[in-house]
Structure formats: C-alpha cells, structure tokens
Image (tube, coloured by chain):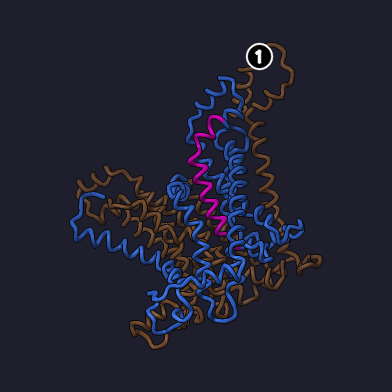
C-alpha cells in the first residue's frame, strides 16, 4: 500500500481485521478439537464453559478407532484421491499439450470444450452416471469413484496446464526438433520437465478436490469397508441417540488432518492453481 | 495457415528424392501427433461426461423406475415438475441462497483482500491458514457446523446462554428462516477465502506506480480505490464471481448434510431436490428432468461470461 501507517491506524486497519478473520475462519475447527477432547460428562454439562477443556480425554478417539472402520475410510480416501489425481494429470497432459503447443484444425473449439466441461457441475450428471455405473457392474466398488472423479478433475487439470504449457517458449521445442529429437522426445525431455510447478499445482488442487468429493461416493460406495471418510462419517457416525458428537468431531478432526498436512507442504502451488484460472483467464 | 505449417515442416526436413510413406515422418506431423495425444482423454470424457449428459437428457423424457424398462412419456416429467410446489420452492430457495451467499462472499472477500494487501510479517502463513475453510473437506466442516447450531448444546446457543442473552436459544436448523440463514452462513464461511485470496492475487498485479501517480494527482484513499483499484480488479472479480455462482447454484453436499433440505423443504436446493426425487424416491426420469431444469441457468451464466470475455 501507499505510505506507512502509524501504529494506531495499523492496529485498526490491519491487526484487528486480521484477528476477526482468524476467529471467523478457525473457530469451527477449535470447537471441533475441543469437543473431541472432552469426556461426555463434561461435554454435555450445561454449566461448563464450552470453550474450555477441564479434563482432556482421548476416549472419543479410541472409541472411534475401535467401533468404526475409520482407518479403512482414511486409507480408501487416500487411495482414491491419489489414483484419480494421477489419472487426471496423465489425461490432462495429453489434452493440454497439443491444445497449448500445436497448431491443427479444431484446436480452438476443443479448448472451449475443455473450459465448458470444467464448468459442467456433477449435480447435472449424477442421475445418468449412477445408471451408467450400475450397468457397467461397477456399483459398490472403489473403481467406480476412481473412474468418475477424473471426470471432474481432467478438465480442470487440462485447463490449468494449458496455461503453463503456453509459458514455455516455442523456440525450445524447435531447437530440440532441429537437433533431431522427435516430437515425443521434445515433449518428454524438454517441455514437460520445465512445467513441474504446473503439475504440482494441478496435482495438489485435484487431490484436495478428490478428498472433498461427496456425491459420487454417496451414490457408489455402500459397503462400510470401502467407504471414503465423508460418506463413512455422515452415513455411520450420526446415530439415533443424541450423544455422538464427541466421536463425530474426533472423526471430522482426524479426517481433515491428512489433507491439511499435505496442503501445508504445497501451499504455494495450491494458491498458484487457485488463482491461475481467474487471474490469467 | 496451419495446413501450410504442417505441410512445410516435415518437407523441409525430409530427405530429398523419393518419398515413400514413413511412419516416423507421419507421426511428426503436428495434426497427427496432436490427435494421437488427444484421442484417449477425449474418449474418456465422451464416455464419462458426454454420454451421461446425453443419457440424462433422454431420461428426462422417459418414466423409468429403478430396475424396470423405460417408457417414453414426452414432456410429462417436466409438466409434473411444473405442477410441483416443492420444485418451485427449491427453485426460489436456490436463487435466494446463491444471490445472498455470493454477495456476502464477494463483499467479505474484497475486504479480506484489501486487509491482506499490506506489508506485515507472516503473510504467507496467514494466507495459508485463512484458506483452511476452503481446504478441509466440506462434509467434515459442515458436520462441525451442525454441532455449532445444535439447539441444546451447540456453541452458538451455549454462548448466548453463557452471557445471559437468552433463556432458551432458538432452533437454528429447525426454523425455516433461521435454517436458510444458517445454510447461507456456512456456504459463506467456506467460500469467502476463495474470493479473498483470488482477489488478493489480482490486487498484487496492480503496479505501485499507478497508485503513486493517482496520489500525486490528488486522489484520496477512496478515490484511489474507486478509480484505480476497482476498475483494474473488475476482470478478476467477474471471473471469481461467475465461478462461485455456478458452484453455489449447483451446491449439494452442504445442504444435504446440514439440513437435508428441511425443515419442510425450506432449504431444499434444486440439486438436493433432484437427488431426493431421482435417488431417494427412485424416479430416475423425474430426477433427470429436475437436474435438466438447472441447465438454462448454466447456459445464461456461460453466455454472460463469454460475452464479457469477448468484450475485454
């Protein structure tokens, strides 16, 4: 910003609003963690301060791991997210590379089709998709979600990668071709290695989207042992009696941890992916 | 133009003399190489995106209870939708939800971006932490919000009672108006950082010199914001808002988990309505028709977007 602010102005214009943003963004997570660490007696005591933990206990975590398939759900979520991210990156590159770097008829039209495909919401497709998956005899398998998640992720990856591929100068490729490299070699040895940041951006973004997916998982994963965290948690941990919040919050907290940890290592690439579409487009 | 390039390049590198067909040369042609790369992903998208879409349109015109053959019924599905008051309630809810949530996210995100567009320590960490609501799987954070809204022991009512503001807290998810407010609040909480961080990235592309020269020309803080910052941010704001409108309009999981569309359909969105008709009641044709009813909105948004992109 222009000019340096004096400290009272800096408190009012920077630190107080930041504090408000932090509280607004984080209090649900604090509440999640606080709930999961309290025993039921304290949790449902109307006189206790709700934000304070007097007797920390891991009972809810122990109960969660003993009584549900939670660890299996975490494993399934990781497996599905990883596989569908890899498929999406591979197909995304195959789609983006020619569209960004080759000249051929219909290239422009295809690029628009990719953008439109990215914006077609899955809510529009789930009814026929359920029917298609059932007829392919893939209902109630992890394969069903590994195949359907990339439909959401491929257009996004391709779109983001088109932007990255365009930033690499055409001369590099031409130099490689003149030196006798085939187009394939020029791509795999010269251009793609230069685009690693793009792959990381697209990859981490696709991974978080896959972790977040709910509708297809809800439709296709019925057996408890093959569920992902979101369907497992909503399908099995919300029970008839009223006193399930401790375990539920333990599950929400533990279930969020892996994606938050992975995100924290790749924040830079995640933000680049987040803003690439809207700032450049 | 592209034809010329294709024809010229391989010829320029080809060995002079006789030219029998050579696989390697053929593969080096731009169009051939491109289509070999494009075919697998395009086939995949056609099978899992194009086909379901086409099949969904077909389903909209048939009656097809689960595990029974389909019968063609013309426009009957759409006529029943038209006559279903719950459908219209879902339409009205969806528009209300999208409009209010988008305005809140845009205003909040703009404020967040302006606050963060200053020099301070730990800016990178701050940005990473403030994005957390957007990262954490929606279902898990929504479950936490459900507990926050719990009428008896939830955080909001406990705080209200702790400070003696009320004797008995309201039923946040049990009252139609409060339930809609709650759903909008949670959507805003999750989407606001997306607006904030993206607009911040847009702010950072505005050169400092512009601000300085505006200051020299006598523009105050408001003047600089109104006549320099805002016009330059418009493209970013436009794209972010369009994206958000699409994803908010078609939102499913938030409402499905938080209220299930209740109480008395007060928070049913078109997506959750389509799900309950198509999946829970098993009427695939009706469900598809309800989903198709959202297409005009998507079309209008895409048209607006492309006309804007063409204009600028």
Q: Nearer the viewer, residue A1 or A109?
A: A1
Q: Residue at x 68, y 41 (%)?
A: B40
Q: Residue furthest top?
A: B17
Snapshot quadrant of residue B154: bottom left
Give the residue number, with chain letter if any, for mark 1: B15
Q: Colour of chain B?
A: brown
Q: Is residue B180 above or below residue A155?
A: below
Q: Which chain is blue?
A: A
Q: Nearer the viewer, residue B288 or A36?
A: A36
Is residue A161 visible to us here? yes
Q: Give the x, y percent position of residue A177.
A: 57, 23
Chain ID of residue with mark 1: B
> How would you rate the neighbour count of disc 1 (Cα within 10 Å): few for under 14, some for 14-19, many for 20 or more?
few
Which residue: 59% across, 25% down?
B5
Q: Is residue A222 left or right of residue B91?
A: right
Magenta span: A189-214
Left or right of B179: which side holds B219?
left
The answer to whether residue A212 is magenta is: yes
Residue A235 placement (x, y as % from top left)? 61, 70
User: Mostly what secondary structure, the magenta segment?
Assistant: helix
């Amino acid at each position: 910003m222009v000019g340096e602010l004096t400290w009272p102005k800096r408190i009012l214009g920077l630190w107080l609003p930041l504090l408000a943003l932090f509280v607004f963004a984080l209090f649900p997570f604090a509440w999640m963690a606080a709930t999961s660490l309290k025993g039921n007696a304290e949790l449902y005591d109307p006189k206790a301060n709700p934000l304070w933990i007097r007797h920390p206990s891991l009972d809810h975590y122990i109960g969660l791991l003993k009584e549900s398939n939670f660890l299996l759900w975490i494993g399934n979520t990781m497996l599905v997210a990883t596989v569908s991210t890899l498929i999406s990156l591979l197909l995304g590159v195959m789609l983006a590379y020619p569209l960004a770097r080759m000249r051929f008829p219909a290239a422009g039209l295809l690029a628009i089709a990719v953008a439109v495909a990215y914006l077609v919401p899955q809510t529009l497709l789930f009814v026929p998709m359920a029917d298609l998956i059932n007829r392919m005899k893939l209902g109630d398998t992890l394969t069903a979600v590994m195949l359907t998640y990339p439909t959401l992720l491929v257009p996004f990856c391709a779109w983001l990668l088109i932007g990255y591929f365009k930033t690499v100068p055409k001369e590099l490729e031409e130099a490689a071709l003149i030196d006798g490299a085939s187009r394939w070699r020029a791509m795999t040895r010269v251009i793609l290695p230069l685009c690693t940041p793009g792959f990381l951006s697209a990859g981490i973004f696709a991974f978080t989207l896959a972790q977040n997916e709910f509708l297809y998982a809800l439709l296709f994963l019925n057996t408890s042992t093959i569920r992902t965290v979101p369907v497992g948690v909503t399908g099995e941990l919300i029970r008839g009696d009223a006193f399930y919040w401790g375990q539920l919050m333990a599950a929400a907290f533990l279930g969020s941890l892996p994606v938050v940890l992975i995100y924290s290592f790749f924040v830079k690439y995640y933000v680049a992916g987040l803003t690439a579409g809207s700032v450049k487009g | 133009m592209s034809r010329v390039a294709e024809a010229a390049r391989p010829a320029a590198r080809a060995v002079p003399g006789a030219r029998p067909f050579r696989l390697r040369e053929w593969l080096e042609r731009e169009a051939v190489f491109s289509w070999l790369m494009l075919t697998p992903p395009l086939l995949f998208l056609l099978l899992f995106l194009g086909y379901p879409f086409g099949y969904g349109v077909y389903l909209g015109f048939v009656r097809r209870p689960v595990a029974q053959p389909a019968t063609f019924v013309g426009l009957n599905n759409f006529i029943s939708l038209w006559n279903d008051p719950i459908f219209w309630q879902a339409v009205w809810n969806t528009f209300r939800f999208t409009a209010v949530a988008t305005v809140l996210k845009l205003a909040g995100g703009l404020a967040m971006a302006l606050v963060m567009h200053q020099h301070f320590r730990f800016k990178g960490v701050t940005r990473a932490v403030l994005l957390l609501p957007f990262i954490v799987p929606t279902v898990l954070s929504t479950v936490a919000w459900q507990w926050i809204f719990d009428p008896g022991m939830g955080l909001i009512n406990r705080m209200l009672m702790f400070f003696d503001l009320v004797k008995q807290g309201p039923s946040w998810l049990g009252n139609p108006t409060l339930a809609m407010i709650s759903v909008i609040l949670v959507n805003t909480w999750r989407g606001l950082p997306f607006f904030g961080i993206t607009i911040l990235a847009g702010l950072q592309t505005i050169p400092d010199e512009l601000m300085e020269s505006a200051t020299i020309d006598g523009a105050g803080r408001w003047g600089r914001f109104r006549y320099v910052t805002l016009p330059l941010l418009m493209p970013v704001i436009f794209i972010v808002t369009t994206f958000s409108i699409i994803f908010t309009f078609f939102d499913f999981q938030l409402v499905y988990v938080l209220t299930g569309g209740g109480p008395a359909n007060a928070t049913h969105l078109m997506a959750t309505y389509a799900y309950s008709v198509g999946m829970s009641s098993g009427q695939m044709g009706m469900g598809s028709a309800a989903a198709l009813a959202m297409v005009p909105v998507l079309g209008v948004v895409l048209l607006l977007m492309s006309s804007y992109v063409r204009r600028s």
